[in-house]
């Protein structure tokens, strides 16, 4: 079936792609159910490498692009202190040859002063990585002790005082603050006034531009305040880092932890601008309280881009709470949240005063759609339509998905006009599902699945079951052979309309599948000649039987039978042909006892109770699993019934020559009778959709054949064998 | 039964005398000893905590050394929250406890089980040596199931052989009731965890999940037949369930009656022990939203006694047992005094 989950398991509940609306830098914080960060961010182990690209770029522009990226990457992010030395020595002509992986800088025309300053800095910086660029690793060994060398302070200070170049000087300032942070990290008693981390930061903070380096330094200051329990200040500084760059977002958001209400109020008071306040509310909105954050930011600045992520999250969270993998119908609390969110977002969208009004109108429309207020949803979508950025493929596709699902919900019936209207969107979706077209990040699967289900329901209501089945194939359809014939006629139709053509792209089966299914059904009606004709038309020989279906034993034991699989593979078609020839012999009066017994065995074994369940596997019936409850209820009676087997056991008993043979046949018939007693539970209409665990199987009844055996065949050897092997029979006998 | 409950109303000294009178051959006060779990990551005892150990004449202390959890990224089990001794452990018999998630055994293969036992033993040894602890017994805490039984038992078997120590494990009530399904662990002793017996539920009518007599009653009947000698772990903790939109969001040990009685933040509801947040605010790093419900689940002296009486009635008499209270690190010293622990322990 095409409706498999190969479009991504995580987001199957969603029809709303945050990527369409929210700036890429917020991607890690898109709503996700189980993991910390959305998408690839979850998998990246980058706490010591997240700034690598930034650092390389900064140095590249320091050298005015004259030192290539690859060399810089090696020197800055890969080389050891020794490797750095070698490259430098080689450049100065003191070493003749370098290993291959090391960059050769000799031939480059670099500013000598800058090069010397670079290597000078680099050697110092490498020595700080031992304590500053470590990561917590999970291990059974003790965590490595991080020691911060005391004499390094003097070295960094000396370099810092000497440095003239502002680029280098700022980096050394960063090194110094970071160094003090690690020195003071374990000391909870140190006051802010006595802290070298803070003092060093504060003295020089206005001497440098507020660039990336500044914010990385600020991150350590935020960390210092956190360790020393000044959460208000820590959170404020983290919010500045969060706002400044994409790279800082994950660590800053991770560290944002208001403790007491008083901290939070103080943090808010520290914000110097409306934008800073908006960032703080935005951070509160990500994991603590989205509704409140949106309201607060709207009050501050309805055009703030800090709203985008929160709006996407509120929509994704709402749709997830309404229906996901674990829950098919929403609970009252989810509906309550839906109501609140719909009211909140609608009221904001109606004002059309945000930076992306189309985003708010689509979100409000979709929330109203989820609230089943289709009129309101249509009105929001109509407004959005006028505001859409027409050249943005993803946004336009998102609009199309929302518009289409609403269009389908609004349909009362489907006539030729509607079908004509649907050709274009159905083609568009079919191309997506068949991967003839791809729109990255588009979440279309749920919308498609639900809308074709809606179409199928409408067609069913109109009495057009063939079209209903074409869109959403359903088992009951195949219970009626006339319907299958209608479906075949449609598939074989010479001149299909444009609508029929696109509709059939959603139908999972072809002619061969239907022929094969018909062949199976005919087999279970004991119409073997016709079954063979159909199987031939299906151009399939069917599956290989796992055991010899013509054998039977007193006690069913599929594993034993499968172990003694026939040497020659027996396909379904071989089974049918063998039945056919056996029947021909019976007709001629040849070996009637033996042949009837074989027929009975095979009809027993191709049912659920037999050793060759493979016979009923096929695309249409889709029987999986090991209990009758995994057989779709439409086909359950057919695949559970042993009536045909019973008929042939009685036929064999009738013509049997010896009492032993008769006893055996009667006993086998009793197995069919006993299985029928299980079937009474399996076939009950109220159990059609139940699982194995929630159905009580009624006690086995002892039918007529046990009594026949006991009254007429107690003196046979077979009777003793049956008593020995069969517990049911034993308990009957004991009564 | 009538007599026992009548005795309960007397002060503890009277109670002891009466107990001796009614049941002269039991000599209960000699049979049970008192001990505590210490479950926090940083080991540091306050004066009050040290006093409790002395006053209850505790000879042993069960200290959680580390947890073992399955790391999804590495697809390996790793130790977490390894104990950090901020002070030397007291000169009592220290029994290191290791908590292992059941998921660890769901994911591990047999080879992994053996190497887990080796690593676990090594880490226990290293941590003990560093603290100069010479332990004779190790305790493993894992809520195993039928599905993980074989691997868990293999692990215990290996660990016992490797460590050459007495091995104990925690036993939950369901493992007692269904002992033939969940199996008897291959160890020397079990510790019956007589708490966390109910569901953490957003349903406000659901009884106290830490302990309630009705739920416990469904399980205690099988105790007498359990095939391992049992010590008893009893709860002396409380917590509050934060419920939002009919879902339990989190459980907090640090939110108790005092916090919930702050009228600026919470108002009591018509239902006992259920409070409603009246504003949005942060407290102790937790964000609380207007309308959040807090369901307080407390263990007080009276309830603890109820548990002890119920349990004692189903245990084999005359067995030497340790009663371990969970847990010392977060113990409310104003609610529980040494004499309370002594009194409770006399029921066994």
Image: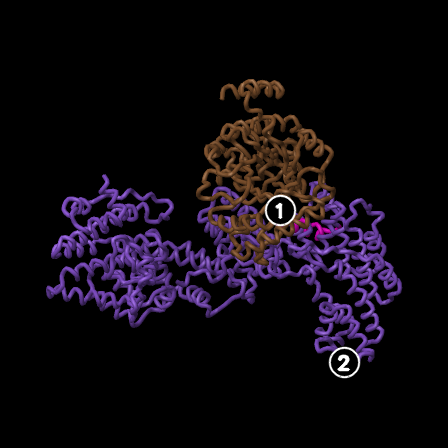
Chain colours: A purple, B brown
Tell me residue B138's x, y (percent): 61, 44
- On the question of residue B297 being in view, the answer is yes
Q: Crowdedness of circle 1 by 10 Å Cα count: few (<14), some, many (20+)?
A: some
Q: Is residue A289 magenta?
A: yes
Residue beneath disc 1: A288
Task: Locate the N terminus of chain A and report the quarter of the image it occupies.
Answer: bottom left
Camera-side mark, 1 or 2 = 2
From which residue to which does the magenta span run?
A272-294
Q: Chain of mark 1?
A: A
For the residues bearing labels 1 and 2, Cβ distance under 8 angstroms: no
Taking A313 as reference, is A46 above or below it?
below
Residue beneath disc 2: A97
The answer to whether marks 1 and 2 sit on the same chain is: yes
Residue A39 location, quadrant = bottom right
Taking B94 as reference, is A88 above or below it?
below
Taking B14 as reference, is A663 above or below it?
below
Instruction: Report the magenta stretch's main SS.
Output: helix
Q: Nearer the viewer, residue B121 or A88?
A: B121
């Amino acid at each position: 079936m095409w409706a498999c989950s190969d479009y991504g398991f995580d987001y199957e509940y969603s029809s709303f792609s945050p990527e369409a609306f929210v700036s890429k830098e917020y991607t890690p914080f898109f709503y996700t159910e189980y993991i910390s960060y959305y998408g690839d961010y979850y998998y990246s182990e980058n706490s010591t490498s997240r700034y690598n690209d930034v650092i390389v770029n900064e140095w590249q522009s320091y050298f005015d692009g004259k030192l290539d990226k690859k060399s810089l990457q090696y020197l800055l992010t890969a080389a050891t202190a020794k490797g750095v030395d070698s490259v430098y020595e080689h450049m100065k002509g003191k070493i003749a040859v370098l290993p291959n992986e090391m960059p050769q800088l000799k031939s480059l025309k670099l500013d000598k002063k800058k090069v010397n300053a670079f290597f000078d800095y680099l050697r110092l910086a490498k020595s700080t990585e031992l304590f500053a660029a470590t990561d917590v690793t999970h291990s059974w060994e003790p965590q490595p002790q991080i020691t911060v060398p005391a004499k390094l302070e003097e070295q960094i200070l000396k370099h810092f005082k000497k440095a003239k170049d502002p680029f280098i000087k700022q980096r050394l300032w960063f090194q110094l603050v970071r160094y003090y942070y690690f020195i003071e990290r374990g000391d909870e008693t140190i006051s802010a006034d006595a802290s070298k981390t803070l003092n060093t930061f504060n003295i020089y903070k206005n001497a440098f531009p507020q660039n990336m380096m500044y914010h990385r330094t600020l991150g350590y200051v935020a960390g210092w305040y956190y360790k020393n329990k000044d959460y208000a200040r820590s959170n404020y500084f983290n919010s500045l880092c969060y706002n400044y760059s994409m790279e800082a977002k994950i660590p800053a958001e991770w560290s944002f932890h208001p403790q007491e209400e008083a901290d939070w109020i103080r943090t808010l008071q520290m914000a110097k601008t409306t934008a800073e306040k908006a960032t703080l509310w935005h951070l509160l909105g990500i994991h603590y309280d989205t509704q409140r954050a949106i309201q607060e930011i709207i009050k501050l600045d309805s055009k703030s881009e800090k709203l985008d992520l929160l709006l996407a999250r509120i929509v994704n969270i709402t749709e997830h709470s309404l229906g996901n993998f674990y829950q098919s119908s929403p609970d009252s609390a989810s509906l309550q949240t839906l109501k609140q969110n719909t009211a909140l977002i609608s009221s904001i969208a109606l004002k059309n005063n945000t930076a992306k009004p189309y985003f708010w109108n689509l979100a409000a429309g979709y929330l109203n759609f989820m609230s089943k207020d289709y009129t309101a949803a249509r009105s929001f979508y109509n407004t959005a339509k006028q505001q859409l950025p027409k050249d943005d493929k993803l946004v336009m596709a998102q609009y199309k998905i929302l518009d289409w699902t609403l269009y389908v919900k609004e349909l009362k019936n489907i006539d030729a006009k509607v079908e004509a209207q649907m050709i274009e969107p159905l083609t568009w979706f079919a191309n997506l599902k068949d991967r003839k077209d791809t729109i990255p990040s588009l979440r279309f699967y749920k919308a498609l699945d639900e809308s074709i289900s809606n179409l199928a329901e409408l067609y069913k209501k109109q009495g057009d079951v063939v079209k209903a089945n074409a869109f959403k194939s359903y088992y009951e359809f195949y219970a009626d052979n006339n319907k299958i014939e209608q479906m075949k006629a449609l598939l074989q139709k010479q001149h299909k309309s444009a609508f029929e053509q696109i509709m059939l792209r959603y139908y999972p089966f072809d002619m061969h599948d239907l022929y094969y299914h018909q062949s199976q059904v005919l087999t279970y009606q004991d119409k073997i000649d016709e079954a063979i004709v159909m199987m031939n038309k299906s151009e399939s020989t069917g599956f290989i039987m796992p055991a010899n279906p013509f054998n039977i034993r007193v006690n069913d034991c599929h594993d034993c039978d499968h172990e003694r699989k026939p040497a020659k593979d027996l396909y379904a078609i071989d089974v049918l042909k063998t039945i056919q020839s056996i029947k021909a012999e019976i007709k001629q009066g040849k070996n009637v006892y033996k042949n009837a017994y074989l027929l009975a065995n095979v009809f027993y074994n191709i049912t659920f109770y037999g050793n060759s369940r493979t016979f009923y596997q096929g695309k249409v019936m889709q029987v999986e699993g090991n209990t009758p409850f995994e057989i779709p209820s439409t086909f359950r009676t057919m695949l559970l019934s042993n009536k045909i087997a019973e008929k042939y056991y009685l036929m064999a008993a009738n013509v049997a020559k010896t009492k032993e043979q008769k006893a055996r046949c009667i006993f086998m018939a009793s197995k069919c009778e006993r299985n029928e007693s299980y079937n009474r539970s399996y076939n009950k209409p109220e159990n059609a959709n139940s699982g194995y665990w929630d159905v009580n199987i009624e006690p086995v009844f002892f039918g007529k054949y046990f009594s026949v055996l006991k009254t007429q065949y107690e003196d046979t050897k077979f009777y003793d064998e049956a008593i020995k092997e069969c517990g049911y029979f034993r308990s009957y006998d004991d009564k | 039964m009538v007599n026992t409950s009548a005795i309960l109303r007397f002060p503890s000294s009277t109670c002891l005398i009466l107990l001796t009178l009614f049941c002269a051959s039991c000599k209960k006060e000699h049979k049970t000893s008192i001990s505590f779990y210490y479950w926090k990551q940083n080991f540091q005892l306050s004066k009050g905590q040290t006093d409790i150990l002395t006053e209850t004449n505790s000879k042993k202390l069960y200290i959680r050394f580390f947890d073992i959890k399955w790391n999804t990224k590495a697809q390996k089990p790793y130790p977490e929250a390894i104990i950090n001794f901020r002070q030397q452990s007291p000169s009592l018999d220290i029994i290191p406890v290791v908590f292992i998630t059941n998921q660890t055994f769901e994911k591990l293969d047999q080879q992994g089980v053996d190497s887990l036992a080796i690593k676990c033993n090594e880490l226990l040894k290293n941590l003990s040596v560093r603290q100069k602890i010479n332990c004779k017994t190790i305790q493993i805490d894992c809520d195993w199931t039928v599905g993980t039984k074989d691997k868990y038992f293999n692990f215990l078997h290996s660990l016992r052989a490797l460590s050459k120590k007495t091995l104990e494990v925690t036993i939950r009530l369901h493992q007692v009731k269904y002992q033939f399904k969940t199996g008897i662990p291959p160890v020397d002793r079990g510790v019956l965890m007589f708490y966390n017996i109910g569901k953490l539920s957003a349903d406000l009518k659901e009884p106290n999940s830490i302990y309630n007599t009705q739920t416990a009653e469904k399980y205690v009947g099988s105790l007498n037949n359990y095939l391992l000698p049992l010590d008893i772990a009893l709860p002396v903790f409380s917590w509050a369930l934060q419920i939002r939109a009919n879902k339990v969001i989190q459980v907090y040990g640090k939110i108790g009656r005092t916090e919930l009685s702050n009228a600026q933040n919470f108002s009591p509801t018509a239902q006992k022990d259920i409070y409603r947040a009246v504003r949005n605010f942060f407290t102790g790093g937790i964000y609380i939203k207007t309308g959040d419900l807090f369901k307080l689940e407390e263990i007080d002296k009276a309830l603890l006694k109820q548990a002890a009486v119920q349990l004692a009635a189903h245990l084999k008499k005359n067995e030497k047992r340790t009663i371990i209270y969970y847990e010392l690190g977060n113990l409310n010293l104003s609610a529980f005094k040494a004499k309370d622990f002594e009194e409770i322990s006399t029921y066994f």
